[in-house]
Image: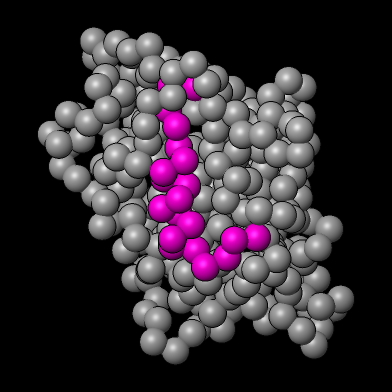
Amino acid sequence: MPDNSTTSPPVALTRREFLLFAGGALLLVACGDGLRGRRPRVGLALGGGGAKGLAHIPMLEALDELGIRPHRIAGTSIGAIIGSLYAGGLGGTRIRGLVEQFLVSQSEAERKLFALPRSLRWLDFIDPALGSGGLLDSSDFIAFLGESIPARRFRDLEIPLKVVAADLWSGVPVILDSGPLLSAVQASMAVPGVFPPVERDGTKLVDGGLANPLPFDLLSDECDLVIAIDVSGDQQPEDGEELSSMGMVFHSFQIMSHNILAEKLRYRQPDIYIKPDLLNIRMLEFYKAHEVFEGALPAKRQLIKALKNVRGLSKPRPGCSPVPA
């Protein structure tokens, strides 16, 4: 007798979905055996991406809502900035408030800092630094950052933190996890040609995006579960758009960092990989913070779903509301 039953076609998964669900399945097995009796140690990797890095904040809020405290954090560039705030004891909501107090309108942003890309009011903290290896000096911004973080040295942080910079001459990654904190963060955000290199221990350091834009590999030896937040976003030219010379510098840097990360992901993946859908957000367009926050909501829900699938990990913190499905 002929078989009249039909077979449903296989469901195609995107690469991101495959990594997310495969990692969750493996972790369920691990947490049921080798990790029995304790919560998995979570590593959190925060990537670079300029203003797009504000998407890290909703991810931190997701961890807070689930009562998950990272065991270790690693960050590059803006990931190092936000990672230092979080490791220093500020929750995701408080970091969001810190950012929002500096938001300005687009028209006001356009008047600031001559022809540089539109930005946040934090550019008021940045002074011209011509002749010192960069166009801008970030010292005042770093001093402001220091006022928001009680820690002055890595050992003062509540959560151990690894900050990624790059050796200016060799391009090799330099991992900073001891000594002064603020100069490490300043080095990690020093985009070549824009901010001057930062010297530490006789080595000139620049933005870690040159070497390791998303440093999830630094956490696997010390953590049971590694979450990587990729805020590189995507860029599509608009009709008739032409980049300024400064825009070309930023865009070229982002292309290079994107290519480094893509090659890295071919050979090694984190347990949970999250990439918020961020389109046409330039490196210094911090005035688009609310657009970034809104665009990151689906990724936040994706992260919460993945973490809830890990046995023994999710434990909602009192007073925190879950994200609507």
Q: Which of the two residues, 94 or 303, is positioned nearer the viewer here?
A: 94
Q: Quadrant of the C terminus?
A: bottom left
User: Any magenta on residue 156?
Assistant: no
Q: Which of the two residues, 86 or 5, is positioned nearer the viewer here?
A: 86
State the residue at coordinates (37%, 36%).
126
Residue at the outermost right position: 34
Query: Where does the image place residue 240, in percent across and percent down from the top left?
Result: 23, 10
- Classify residue 316 as left or right of residue 225: left
Above or below for 257 versus 74? above
Above or below for 218 versus 115? below
State the residue at coordinates (45%, 50%).
143
State the residue at coordinates (43%, 66%).
92
The quarter of the picture where residue 77 lies is top right
Query: Where does the image place residue 277, in percent across and percent down from the top left?
Result: 41, 43
Q: Which of the two residues, 199 or 17, is positioned nearer the viewer here?
A: 199
Q: Is residue 94 visible?
A: yes
Q: Quadrant of the N terminus?
A: bottom right
Above or below for 98 versus 167? below
Query: Where does the image place residue 46, in percent across and percent down from the top left?
Result: 57, 50
State the residue at coordinates (41%, 43%).
140
Query: Where does the image place residue 212, in percent across and percent down from the top left?
Result: 68, 36
Q: Is residue 3 visible?
A: no
- Classify residue 54 as left or right of residue 263: left
Magenta part of the protein: which range? 134-153
